């Protein structure tokens, strides 16, 4: 009995699929392969430089309370784009699939406080590291502690579930201190202010940022743990684009623009661009 | 002219032959009762004539139109083309044992739907006919009710009205009272008797022996897929009946 | 978080209710009819079709929707850049601009529609198969065509029978729209996660949760009304 109904519904289904297809298509023709054209020229031609970020990394690149994507990386990228004469497009992505987005051509680079590691260096064309990050101890300005060694027997606050917590637990001083986990870094710092913990263990860039934006009277101990470097990731074949961005970063370092942006976010120039 | 001609009809479900060489005629205005034990093939016969089952062999024609014939080129049967089959189907109405009313339609719409979408009658016309039929069934007050609000007997009367709304030439009943409480069978039998008095041609598969004897012009006794005996009620229910028929009727009256 | 900050987040999330509802609405719009088609295909007497339909349903119900969204999203660029892809497919795919604003939404929609159609198909199939054979026979005896029988007699009864199970799916769909955030589709959950990092607080996520709760509650009320409306017969 279903034959005639079937014919109708199959037609309807096909029509539906085609409609969906047409929906997803736009008329624009894409240049066939990325390697044939100069990657820098492509960006200049389109007038757009698409920066991929997951927009949750405070203060490197994140969404603020007005739903604007801001951060240190964004300020730097804006300046780079200005000098290249193109528009910066901030494209939120899922951090877990950033390499796929890059290779698929949805974005031109990943620029979001991305740490350098062997796998990423293998899969992407990385810029020179532009900043160092390490895990550091923050103490109240009036604390007597000057280095890690002085923290023996102290209570150390750390964000629960963070990389800092793991690193602290695996460090040599783990046995000599007492860990106190908080839900957030902010909470840990507040506990330090009220004297519940003696120091807080966290990323140096977050620490610097909190001190600058919060205007707090904290001090960062000079020695830390687990140093890592941040770099910008480009497609393997996009050598020209990478070199151009690298060149502009060098110029910005030389003329003090980079230092200016760094000071705005971290209180001093902590960039490592040469 | 015979309203219905069935000739050498066979029906198999796989290896099981449920109808073996069935032949009989129904004349205009005739009321035929088909009786026999369960599993004798009575319902299957009705379903073959109503195109709900495909026959395996034989010939059926309705009102002079050939519905199916033996395949001249070999085994099996050839059915008429779809248009003719539809014309034939419009000549016959079927009343089911379980009523099979459409639960989502009101009583009125159950009756008007087919005339409107099949015969393309106007709503007014279809409703006029429906109300008349409901009056005939003594159910005019139930036009706006839903089937679930009616008793079994009332539902069966609606389903008879629904079949009559297409003005069939022959009406088939497949054990119309079997799903009803004994006290409700009377009202259905009364309706069928009235239809018989009006000259309606009917074929009734039934277990109501007294009713068959009373109303039918012809009674067909079936067993194991064959017609054992066929004739006037006086013959089958009388002393001249075959031994097999007598045995069946005797067992029936006992239990 | 201060109450001002909370209010700020609520306002922001309210704006992103639109993309959430867009995924929800379009998914329903396409997956319900497609589900009906799939249900009929599955009941097809021609075995290869019902077999293929079964495989489709098995895959759609057997893998996470999150994965399907990712596959739908990256299938186009991966096929385009893949080595073994036939040229005509590449040509076809070259017409799709993955940087286009609508691309992300369309990819998400394809995954959602295909997934939900599979679930709806099984609900509808159950509904269709629960209609007694006598209904088909009564319609046939009244000379109704197959199309008339399906649309006038069977479908209305199926609708009533599938409403409770479909309500379940629809309410699940509201919450499943949050899965679109795996490809960074800007909807409530993605925004809540961003705000969560900004304020170092779980509160934005709870606010998003409250949004879903309100939507689900509204749907629950709507469906119980519909069920009541359809209760005029048994």
Image (tube, coloured by chain):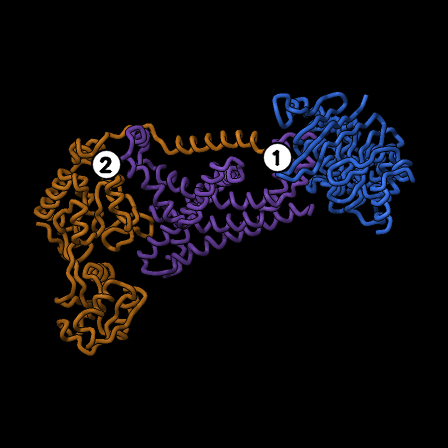
Chain colours: A orange, B blue, C purple
Front position in the image: A152 or A106: A106
Left or right? Give the position of A59 relative to C210: left
Per the model, the C-alpha gap separating discs 2 and 1 is: 53 Å
Q: How many marks?
A: 2
Percent across and percent down for residue A178 are 24, 76
Q: Tell me if residue A256 can be seen.
A: yes
Residue B131, image quadrant? top right
Residue closest to the far bottom: A153
Residue at image position (14%, 54%) is A131
- B255 in relation to C103, above or below: below
Give the quadrant of residue C81.
Answer: top left
Tell me the tag on residue A48.
2
Which residue lies at the image location 81% right of the left edge and 43% below the top edge?
B207
- Mark 1 falls on what kind of element? helix
Give percent across and percent down for residue C88. Answer: 31, 28
Residue to which mark 1 is pinned = C151
Q: Which mark is residue A189?
A: none
Residue A111, position as x, y percentages in the image: 21, 47
- Tell me the element at label 2: strand
Give the chain of mark 2.
A
B247 or A157, nearer to the observer: B247
Which of the two residues, C21 or A5, is positioned nearer the viewer here?
A: A5
- Going 59% across and 43% down the picture, which residue do you hit? C129
Above/below status of B200 relative to B188: above
For the residues carrying marks 2 and 1, which lies nearer the camera in this image? 1
Q: Residues within 10 Å of mark 1 (few under 14, many from 20)?
A: few
**Chain on which label 1 sits:** C
């Amino acid at each position: 009995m279903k034959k005639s109904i079937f014919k109708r519904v199959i037609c309807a289904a096909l029509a539906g699929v085609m409609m969906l297809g047409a929906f997803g298509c736009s008329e624009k023709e894409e240049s066939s392969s990325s390697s044939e054209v100069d990657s820098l020229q492509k960006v200049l031609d389109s007038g757009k430089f698409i920066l991929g970020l997951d927009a949750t990394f405070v203060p490197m690149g994140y969404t603020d309370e007005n739903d604007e994507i801001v951060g240190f990386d964004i300020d730097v990228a804006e300046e780079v784009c200005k000098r290249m004469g193109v528009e910066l497009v901030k494209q939120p992505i899922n951090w877990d699939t950033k390499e796929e987005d890059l290779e698929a051509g949805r974005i031109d680079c990943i620029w979001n406080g991305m740490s350098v590691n062997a796998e990423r260096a293998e899969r992407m064309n990385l810029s020179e590291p532009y900043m160092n990050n390490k895990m550091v101890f923050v103490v109240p300005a009036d604390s007597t502690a000057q280095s890690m060694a002085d923290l023996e027997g102290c209570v150390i606050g750390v964000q629960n579930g963070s990389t800092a917590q793991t690193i602290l637990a695996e460090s040599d001083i783990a046995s000599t201190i007492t860990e106190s986990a908080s839900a957030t870094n902010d909470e840990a710092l507040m506990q330090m202010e009220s004297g519940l913990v003696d120091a807080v263990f966290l990323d140096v860039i977050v620490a610097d940022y909190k001190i600058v934006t919060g205007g707090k009277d904290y001090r960062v101990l000079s020695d830390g743990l687990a140093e890592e470097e941040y770099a910008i990731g480009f497609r393997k074949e996009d050598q020209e684009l990478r070199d151009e961005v690298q060149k502009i970063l060098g110029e910005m370092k030389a003329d003090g623009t980079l230092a200016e942006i760094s000071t705005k976010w971290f209180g001093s120039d902590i960039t490592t661009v040469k | 002219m015979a309203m219905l001609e069935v000739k050498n009809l066979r029906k198999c479900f796989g290896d099981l032959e449920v109808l073996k060489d069935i032949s009989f005629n129904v004349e205009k205005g005739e009321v035929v009762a088909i009786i026999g034990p369960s599993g004798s093939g009575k319902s299957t016969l009705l379903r073959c004539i109503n195109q709900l089952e495909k026959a395996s062999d034989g010939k059926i024609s309705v009102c002079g139109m050939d519905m199916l014939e033996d395949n001249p080129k070999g085994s099996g049967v050839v059915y008429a083309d779809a248009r003719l089959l539809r014309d034939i189907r419009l000549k016959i109405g079927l009343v089911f044992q379980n009523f099979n009313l459409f639960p989502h339609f009101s009583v009125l719409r159950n009756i008007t739907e087919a005339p409107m979408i099949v015969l393309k009658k106007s709503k007014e016309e279809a409703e006029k006919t429906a109300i008349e039929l409901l009056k005939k069934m003594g159910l005019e007050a139930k036009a706006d009710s839903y089937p679930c609000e009616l008793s079994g007997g009332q539902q069966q009367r609606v389903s008879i009205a629904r079949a009559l709304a297409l003005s069939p030439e022959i009406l088939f009943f497949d054990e119309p009272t079997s799903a009803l409480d004994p006290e409700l069978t009377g009202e259905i039998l009364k309706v069928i008797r009235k239809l018989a008095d009006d000259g309606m041609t009917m074929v009734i598969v039934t277990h109501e022996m007294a009713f068959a004897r009373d109303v039918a012009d012809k009674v067909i006794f079936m067993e194991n897929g064959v017609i054992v005996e066929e004739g006037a009620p006086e013959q089958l229910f009388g002393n001249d009946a075959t031994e097999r028929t007598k045995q069946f009727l005797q067992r029936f009256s006992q239990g | 978080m201060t109450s001002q900050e909370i209010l700020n987040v609520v306002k922001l999330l309210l704006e992103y209710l639109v993309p959430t509802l867009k995924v929800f609405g379009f998914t329903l719009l396409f997956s319900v009819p497609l589900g009906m088609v799939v249900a009929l295909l599955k009941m097809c007497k021609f075995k290869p079709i019902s077999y293929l339909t079964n495989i489709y349903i098995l895959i759609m119900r057997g893998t996470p929707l999150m994965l399907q969204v990712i596959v739908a999203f990256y299938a186009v660029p991966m096929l385009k850049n893949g080595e073994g892809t036939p040229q005509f497919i590449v040509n076809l795919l070259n017409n799709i601009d993955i940087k286009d604003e609508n691309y992300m939404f369309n990819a998400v929609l394809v995954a959602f529609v295909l997934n939900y159609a599979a679930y709806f198909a099984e609900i509808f199939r159950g509904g269709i198969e629960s209609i007694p054979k006598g209904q088909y026979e009564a319609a046939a005896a009244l000379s109704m065509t197959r199309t008339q029988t399906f649309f006038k007699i069977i479908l209305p009864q199926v609708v009533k029978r599938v409403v409770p199970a479909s309500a379940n799916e629809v309410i699940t769909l509201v919450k499943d729209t949050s899965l679109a955030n795996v490809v960074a589709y800007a909807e409530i959950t993605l925004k809540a996660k961003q705000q969560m990092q900004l304020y170092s607080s779980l509160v934005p996520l709870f606010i998003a949760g409250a949004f879903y709760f309100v939507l689900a509650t509204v749907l629950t009320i709507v469906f119980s009304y519909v069920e009541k409306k359809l209760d005029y017969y048994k």
